[in-house]
Image (cartoon, rainbow, N blue to C red):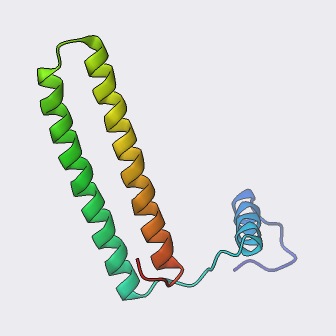
Amino acid sequence: MPDDDAPKSAYELAMERLRKKDQEAGEDDRPLTDEQKTAIAEIRSFYKSKSAEIEILHQAALRTAQTREAVDALNDNLRRDNDRLAGERDRKIAAIRKGESA
């Protein structure tokens, strides 16, 4: 650790600002427990597989699409589904980080 009176690098200053911002926002700086890490890994794995499943179904549907409008609708549905899954995943991970059950 550098001395307190020594000049700080831009990296150190940025990290201090981020830590202060996190503290003001109520973010906790505790390290995750092994159980939390395992639960987060399981959640990420589950949602990665769900996203892959949706992508496979999307590709199959694209092969049968007859019009450009149908393709656009399928692409919109894929985007919405992926956004929904990512939101669910992020909410569950945030709950685990806060110590709540997912």
Residue 42 locus on image (x, y percent): 28, 72
In the current view of this chain or complex, which residue is farthest to the top?
Answer: 67
In the depicted view, which residue is nearer to us: 17 or 33? Answer: 33
Whether residue 99 sits left or right of residue 21 in the image: it is: left
Residue 97 locus on image (x, y percent): 50, 77
Q: How many marks?
A: 0
Seen in the picture, residue 65 relative to 9 is either above or below; the reply is: above
Residue 59 locus on image (x, y percent): 17, 32
Task: Residue 102: name its quadrant.
Answer: bottom left
Residue at left offset 16%, top offset 39%: 57
Seen in the picture, residue 21 relative to 68 is either above or below; the reply is: below
Seen in the picture, residue 49 relative to 63 is either above or below; the reply is: below
Whether residue 49 sits left or right of residue 12 in the image: it is: left
Residue at left offset 42%, top offset 46%: 83
In the depicted view, which residue is nearer to us: 21 or 55? Answer: 55
Whether residue 19 sits left or right of residue 48 in the image: it is: right
Task: Residue 71: name its quadrant.
Answer: top left
Residue at left offset 40%, top offset 53%: 86
Residue 22 locus on image (x, y percent): 70, 70
> Image quadrant for the N terminus?
bottom right
In the current view of this chain or complex, which residue is farthest to the right?
Answer: 5
Task: Residue 47: name its quadrant.
Answer: bottom left
